[in-house]
Structure formats: structure tokens, C-alpha cells
Image (cartoon, grey):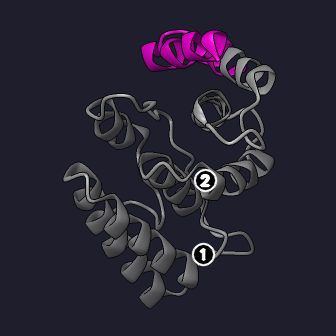
């Protein structure tokens, strides 16, 4: 049985590779709650919510998926998979302002994580908000993601977008 809160990067890669115009997220952060795992009942509930949110994302039901991730975070506010997932869903919804602090929080906990770097690069390259758009940051994050995982074509795509930002 998987540990609570774990989502494989493969699931995220499949879900987001299907979505045109959005970065794919492989190697999604995997974590347990800081200070210990949630209690038994909470762990089971979180596990069920993650299964449900994966179905919602496969059906491109982004708003509903965001609600489920928020529910997970009310149970386990430090769950990095939920933070990453909510940030990623916010990218799909075009809400870069909401996605940015979530992904930055995950990056502080997992410095150098290629999927988080990739998503941050995408936000800074594609946002129309001048307070968020930052081509230099986009390029830096995208380069780090590609150097870390050079075989991921989606990271190369983000790097190209960062060059055009």
C-alpha cells in the first residue's frame, strides 16, 4: 500500500502531457507530513481524496480538483503533494497568482525539484501579470529543471517558452 499523500510523478506526467499548452509535471514531490504522518483515519481519507483528485484531473475538472486539494490541505496542511497538485491545478485554471506561492513553498522544502522548477518557470514565462512575469527567473528555473532531468521533453518545451518570454 502506498504511504499517505504519495502521488507518483508518472500520473502527473500523463495527466498534464494530455493538456495542450500546459507544462507536464513529472517526478511530482512525494512527502509525508512534517512531524509525522496523519492519524490512521486521516491517512485513509487523504488516500481516497488523492484517488478522487486524480480522476478529476484526468477529466480536466480543474475547479473540482482544486477543491479536493484544498480539502486535503485542511487535513494535512504540510502535504507537499497536495501543495504541488493545487499549484499545478491553479496553473491549469490560469490562476498563476494563486499557484506561485504554493509552488514556491514546495521548492523551499525540496530545493532543486525539477517538476517544481519547471512549473515555476512556466508561470514566470507565461503570466501576463507584470508582477509575476519574469523572463530571467523563467529561464533560470527552466535551465535548472533541464539540467536535472535532461530526458524530459516537457522541461525542454518550458525552456523554449522561457527563451521566448
Q: Which residue is at 56% across, 10% downward?
A: 160
Q: Which residue is at 76% across, 29% downward?
A: 134
In screen coordinates, is 81 left or right of 137? left
Classify the position of the C terminus by image quarter. top right
Q: Crowdedness of circle 1 by 10 Å Cα count: few (<14), some, many (20+)? A: some
According to the picture, the residue beneath numbered tag 2 turns out to be 99
Quarter where residue 76 is shown = bottom right
The kind of secondary structure element at disc 1 is: loop
Query: Is the magenta region chiefly helix, strand or loop?
Result: helix
Closer to the camera in the image, 72 or 86:
86
Q: Which label number is shown at residue 37?
A: 1
Comes first in the chain, label 2 or label 1: 1
Q: Position of residue 127 (x, y in %)?
A: 61, 37
Closer to the camera in the image, 93 or 35:
93
The kind of secondary structure element at disc 2 is: helix
Reply yes or no: does residue 66 show up in magenta.
no
Closer to the camera in the image, 63 or 114:
63
Quarter where residue 163 is shown = top right
Q: Is residue 19 above or below residue 59?
A: above
In screen coordinates, is 106 left or right of 108? left
Closer to the camera in the image, 145 or 29:
145
Amino acid at each position: 500500500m502506498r504511504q499517505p499523500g504519495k502521488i507518483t510523478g508518472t500520473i502527473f506526467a500523463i495527466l498534464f502531457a494530455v493538456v495542450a499548452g500546459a507544462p507536464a509535471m513529472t517526478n511530482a514531490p512525494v512527502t509525508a507530513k512534517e512531524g509525522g504522518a496523519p492519524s490512521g483515519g486521516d491517512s485513509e481519507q487523504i488516500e481516497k481524496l488523492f484517488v478522487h483528485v486524480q480522476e478529476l484531473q484526468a477529466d480536466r475538472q480543474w475547479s473540482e480538483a482544486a477543491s479536493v486539494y484544498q480539502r486535503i490541505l485542511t487535513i494535512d496542511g504540510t502535504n507537499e503533494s497536495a501543495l504541488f497538485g493545487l499549484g499545478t491545478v491553479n496553473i491549469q485554471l490560469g490562476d498563476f497568482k494563486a499557484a506561485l506561492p504554493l509552488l514556491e513553498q514546495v521548492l523551499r522544502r525540496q530545493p532543486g525539484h525539477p517538476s517544481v522548477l519547471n512549473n515555476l518557470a512556466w508561470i514566470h514565462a507565461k503570466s501576463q501579470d507584470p508582477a509575476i512575469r519574469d523572463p530571467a527567473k523563467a529561464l533560470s528555473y527552466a535551465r535548472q529543471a533541464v539540467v536535472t532531468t535532461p530526458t524530459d521533453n516537457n522541461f525542454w518545451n518550458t525552456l523554449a517558452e522561457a527563451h521566448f518570454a
